[in-house]
Amino acid sequence: MRHNKHHASLGVTREHRAAMLSNLAVSLIEHGRIKTTLTKAKALRPFVEKVITKAKKAAVATEKKDKLHLRRLALRDVRDEAAIASLFDEKCKEFANRPGGYTRIYKLSQQRRGDAAEMALIEFIKGDDVGYKKSKGRKAAKPAKASAPAEEAPAAAAPAASA
């Protein structure tokens, strides 16, 4: 059975994919925003959000061994001590009140010149950002404008019927 086996392979081996995602995560943690292909950005999002969740759990952990364990688990994925230290010590405070969804992906209109790959911008969301409001559905048509043409239409049809 191949349950839970789907992920973006990115056209490389498993080891290369892990190294690529690790390097992209380090760049995102250091700079806050990076430009990459849309496929890599979509693969990076769950990868980096799991690391941020580990940092948040370490921030609220009471025992030192739990904090160290979570930091080592994150180091297993990201493989850069400076980036992990920055994330666990400083940046996890920004996401303390946020229940997930720490990154945002913007599609860029231009494509890469060499291979026409779709480009995207992935960035961290600020902790106080509320995002977009959910729509309540389609807006109702304005009754004043909808009723005026409806009255004129039968009047125009009446002379044609009597002729």
Image (tube, rainbow, N blue to C red):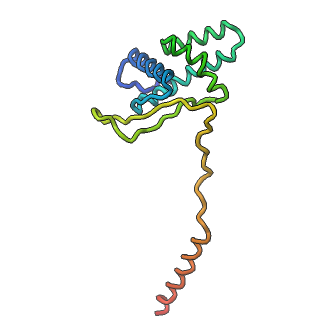
Q: How many marks?
A: 0
Q: Residue furthest right?
A: 62
Residue at position x 39%, y 31% in the image: 37
Relative side of 39 to 129, left or right: left
Residue 53 found in image quarter: top right
Q: Residue furthest top?
A: 65
Residue at position x 48%, y 21% in the image: 25
Q: Residue furthest left?
A: 114
Q: Where is residue 52 shown, x and y percent of the image?
A: 58, 22
Residue at position x 44%, y 22% in the image: 24
Residue 87 found in image quarter: top right
Q: Identify which residue, 76 or 60, lies in the foreground.
A: 60
Q: Identify which residue, 137 or 2, lies in the foreground.
A: 137
Q: Where is residue 86 shown, x and y percent of the image?
A: 55, 16
Residue at position x 31%, y 36% in the image: 116
Q: Where is residue 85 shown, x and y percent of the image?
A: 56, 13
Examine the rendered structure and indicate whether residue 66 appears above or below residue 24: above
Examine the rendered structure and indicate whether residue 56 appears above or below residue 110: above
Q: Residue furthest bottom?
A: 163
Q: Where is residue 162 shown, x and y percent of the image?
A: 49, 92
